[in-house]
Amino acid sequence: MMAHQITLIPGDGIGPEVADATVRAVDATGVATEWERVDAGARALAEYGQLIPDEVFASLEITRVGLKGPTATPIGGGHQSINVALRKKLGLYVNFRPVRMLPGLKTRFSDLPLNLAIFRENTEDLYSGLEHEVIPGVVESLKIITEKASTKIARASFEYARRENRSKVTAIHKANIMKLSDGLFLKCCRQVASEYPEIQYNELIVDNACMQLVMRPETFDLLVMPNLYGDIISDLAAGLVGGLGIVPGANIGDHHAIFEAVHGTAPDIAGKGLANPTALMQSAVLMLAHLGERDAAARLQNAIHKTYAAAEHLTFDVGGKASTSEFTDAVIAQM
């Protein structure tokens, strides 16, 4: 059996700890893997003088699949987000975030069987990074929306809905104000929706969507939206089920895919064995399914669910006392 070649980017802060834990869990599924470890972020900058060394892209050109831990991004200055740079360089136009309740985890919404799928366009909008100072005290940022990118994310969301038997797709927008840019996004969504008559399609203005998500999140199924709204709403939705420490993320293009933990680097607990690897492990579940290893993906997902249901070996951020390695041991034992 041919081994799957996977590029491993551990990241900063707690990244190496959750990455090592996830590698252990993936290997325990029995799937043959060959991991190529490369650095990006603060460690790469210190060692190579580059945030994303050339070897990162060279590895991904061979493997086509990456598993990535969290990397830090400065606020209000400094370097560009490493995530944004990877997405643009590799054409990872789909940001996919499934949001599901884990068994036994107590949240304000734990009585609801939440199972949302969020599709976010990943390459343009305000994240194109086209901004400049017009005159001192006046800065202009350009919002880029194209027919090509909007159609591709709409089609990806409807294809997923059809494949996974999702019943409803909701397009999120602000076309009442940004009539041309968000209007174009909606036009593309409507055109694609007409090709999937079995799937219910509706639209919500982004501010109303945020209100509805915290009032009645169980009414949503699959949501599709431009980049900036997706960044905000996917984090909001994560808060419904316990936070960024447990939800997975995937960045998928026509030729490459990177699966990542979307939480922060948590430098205050780095190296202490306290980090929760659930988000990256669940991202690895998505990765295994992407690689065609759906049985292994299901076994790892079930093991995570059983570990949470048992509630005996959870990390401190979700109410337990286990270390990173103890939680990982428990997941592997459940498999």
Image (cartoon, helix red, strand yellow):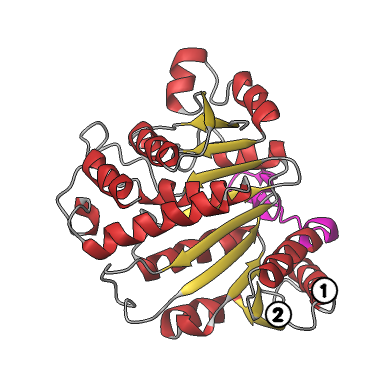
Q: Circles 1 and 2: CB distance less than 8 Å?
A: no
Q: Distance between the residues labelled 1 and 2?
A: 13 Å
Q: Where is residue 40 in the image (x, y as percent from the top left)?
A: 51, 27
Crowding at dot 1, Cα within 10 Å, few <14 / some 14-19 / many 20+, comes out as some
- The image's mark for residue 286 is none
Q: Which disc, if any, is residue 176? A: 2
* Residue 138 seen from this side: no
- Tell me the kind of residue under disc 1: Lys
The one nearer the camera, 278 or 132, is 278
Image disc number at residue 187? 1
> Taking 220 as reference, is 102 above or below it?
above
Residue 148 part of the magenta segment? yes
Question: Identity of the amino acid at label 2?
Answer: Asn
Residue 221 position within the rendered picture, expressed as x and y whole percent measured from the top left: 57, 77
SS category of the residue bearing label 2: loop
Q: Which of marks 1 and 2 is nearer the N terminus?
A: 2
**Residue 2: % across, % down:** 63, 31
Front residue of this view, candidates 111 and 298: 298
Closer to the camera: disc 1 or disc 2?
Answer: 1
Q: Residue at x 68, y 65 (%)?
A: 160
- For the record, the magenta segment spans 124-150
Q: Nearer the viewer, residue 29 or 20?
A: 29
Q: Tell me: 330 left or right of 65.
A: left
Judged from the image, the secondary structure of the residue bearing numbered disc 1 is: helix
